Amino acid sequence: MSMQSELFQQMRAGSPLPSSRTVRLNGKSWTTSPVFDAYWAFAAERQGIFYRRVSDIQPFTQDPILRKFKFTNAYRVLDRTTQYLIRDVILQSEPTETNVFFRILLFKLFNKIETWQLLTAELGELTFKGYRFERYDRVLTKALEVGRRIYSAAYIMPSGGPKAEGKKHRSHLLLLEKMLREEVPKKLASTRTMREGFALLRSYPMIGDFLAYQFITDLNYSDLTEFSEMEFVMPGPGALDGLKKCFPQMVPSDAPSLIRAVCEQQEDLQRELGIEPVSLYGRPLQLIDCQNLFCETDKYARVSYPEIAGFSGRTRIKQSFRMTGPIPKPVFPVKWGLAAVPHS
């Protein structure tokens, strides 16, 4: 049995907790819980599932928790919605700053493939030039009236108050109009750092820290910006819970530096556990991926290590896994120069 398999055996509900250990990060010694070892075992197994699924090698996993519940990929770029964003929203866009920004933000405000497909079916190609508030509002309102969901459950989009007139999608369309009217695409294209781009998005109503970080990451998949994913990280609530379960003595202000240290030392930390370092066709985990993995490990630990608490106290995993059939060959931002190749 491999070290990775042994770790998964230990992670399962009811297994005795192994003793904690000490790791050196940022020149400081941190006492870790067994969830930190589980973090790396989860990352390796989740990426292994991706490679097995894309090659249609079954079984995809023997782990009962991963078979039962839904977890995102080790790499954010591989998730179904992000793959659709790159393949069908970005790569199919007229390559102008305004149109690329319009299409990405329109998609991400709802973050639901079916909503994009609905709008396309009703309105044709979605472009800024052809945008009219009344047409988009009519399609979305009609969908709501017949009981369709137009927002993803992945994260909650805040409403816009009175201007929404009872329909928050109206506030989001008005927000997109405001950003385009104030030339955000042009401003964003001239920003030098991801942090500056994040701050620009964060300055708009209804966009908090979490959404601004997600949106700047999505925009950065296009040629509108040229930021490194190793430049900047903004931990979300789920990642904070995962970090707390891995590093019991941490406080929220430790989170960005801890994620960076874990990401920068990923190869050594995995090899210490006998785990072959996780890779996406040669690309190591980036800050956004390590941040997401802390969130997913928090979820996994709710079942495997219910005794270990995070900040929020959440105890259940809400979404069950449902097989959707084979997954297509992945696509990546052109500027990455990354190509999917058979994985040995």
Image (tube, helix red, strand yellow):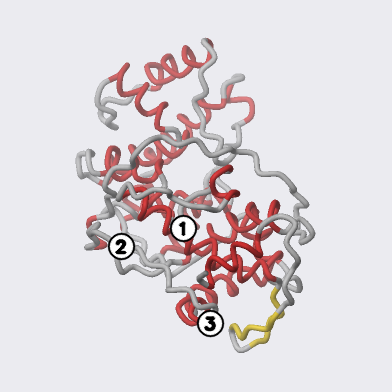
Tell which circle, 2 or 1, labels the residue nearer the N-terminal end: 1
Which residue: 41% across, 27% down? 114
Q: In the figure, 154 relative to 220: above or below?
A: above
- Between residues 84 and 151, which one lies in front from this camera angle? 84
Residue type at mark 1 is Ala
Q: For mark 1, give the secondary structure.
A: loop
Could you say where residue 101 lies in the image, as x and y percent from the top left? 33, 43
Q: In the figure, 312 relative to 15: above or below?
A: above
Which residue: 27% across, 54% down? 333
Residue at image mark 3: 272
Residue type at mark 2 is Glu
Which residue: 58% across, 42% down? 68
Tell which circle, 2 or 3, labels the residue nearer the N-terminal end: 2
Are the two marked residues, 2 and 3, in contact with CB atoms closer than 8 angstroms?
no
Of tags 2 and 3, which is closer to the observer?
Answer: 3
Number of marks present in the image shown: 3
Q: For mark 3, give the secondary structure.
A: loop
Q: In the figure, 322 relative to 315: above or below?
A: above
Q: Quadrant of the C terminus?
A: bottom left
3 left or right of 326 in image: right
Residue at image mark 1: 74
